[in-house]
Amino acid sequence: MQDPHKPDLDDSLNVTQSHERLLRDAAAVAREKRVNDGGREPVSNWIFVTGGVVAIAAGLALGQAGGLFDYDATVAPGYVRRSLDSGEDSGPPPVDALKAYMAKGEKIYSKCVGCHGPDGKGGGAYPSLAGSEWAMGPTERFSMVILNGLTGPTSTGKEFGVMPAQGVGMSPTDLAAVMTYVRNSFGNEKGEVVTQEMAAHAIEISEKRAQVGTPVNKGELDSDHLQDLEGAALDPTTKVDPVSLAPVEE
Ligand code: HEC
């Protein structure tokens, strides 16, 4: 007997009907929601969009109420939260001027240390900076020696040869710092700051020397550079930025 599920291939009507049934079933399956491999229906994008909008709205509402989203309320007691736009945390903490100039000057002294030594006492072919009259005396004279080098007798009358110029690439900040450092190290105790403003004047004066490009000597120092550099004194306890050495408002 003919199996009812199988089309009777001899009966063309039966074949057509079962073909149509197959197409109908396939279309029905296609109409069903897509089901992914795990067997779960994919979540509609609308759920995400709606959920996101609700979450943002709730966050804004809570934030305005000063509740869960209050940033300042999240600081542990005893700690200070600096507000981001106050500029308070825009750099390292300010330091006393003399201390800051000394710290910077110690680094610049690396230019001098090979000859004048870590203790500033020189020795052998180099004069001592400890107690040196030309380091401790008028600032213009000292600055001219650094910027241009020196030839002929030193402050003690002794001759060592020629000190090469150290001014190339030296900014007013560098010069001010190294002068302050030498005048307050190795037992030298000036207790004063040679400021950036003073050092800037020194560089101007040096560039206008008649013998520009040659080392200074005692004759020129005595006749042209026996004064202190112009510029307002800076109280050694004024707070300055340790990097720029510029005074900081407190
Ligand atoms: C290459 C070696 C060398 C370097 C580097 C050097 N000096 Fe000198 N310095 C000398 C010599 C040599 C003399 C003595 C020159 C002379 O006899 O005329 C001297 C003399 C001096 C004097 C005069 C001292 C006095 O009492 O007469 C001062 C001040 C001085 N140097 C400071 C410095 C500083 C500050 C630096 C670094 C920025 C420096 N020197 C770098 C070799 C050097």
Image (cartoon, rainbow, N blue to C red):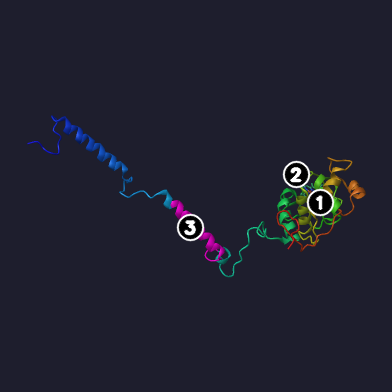
> Is the residue marked 3 within 8 Å of ligand 1, measured from its CB?
no
User: From the viewer's perspective, is residue 54 above or below residue 23?
Assistant: below
The secondary element bearing badge 1 is classed as helix
Name the spot of residue 103 as percent of width and height, x first.
71, 57
What label sits on residue 169 in the rendered view?
2
What label sits on residue 199 in the rendered view?
1
Label 1: how many residues lie within 10 Å, few (<14), some (14-19) or many (20+)?
A: many
Tell whether label 2 touches label 3 (CB within 8 Å): no
Residue at the disc numbered 3 = 55
Which badge, 2 or 1, is on the more N-terminal residue? Answer: 2
The residue mark sitting in front, 1 or 3, is 3
Amino acid type of the residue that numbered disc 1 sits on in the rendered structure: Ala
The residue mark sitting in front, 3 or 2, is 3
**Residue 65 in magenta stretch:** yes
Amino acid type of the residue that numbered disc 2 sits on in the rendered structure: Gly
What label sits on residue 173 in the rendered view?
none
**Image point 90% across, 46% down: which residue?**
220
What residue occupies the far left of the structure in this picture?
1
179 on left or right of 8 = right
43 on left or right of 107 = left
Name the spot of residue 245 as percent of width and height, x first.
74, 55
**Residue 28 in magenta stretch:** no
Tell whether label 1 touches label 2 (CB within 8 Å): no
Q: Distance between the residues labelled 1 and 3?
A: 61 Å
Q: Distance between the residues labelled 2 and 1?
A: 13 Å
Magenta: main secondary structure: helix
Which residues, given as a range, are shown in magenta? 48-69
What residue occupies the far right of the structure in this picture?
223
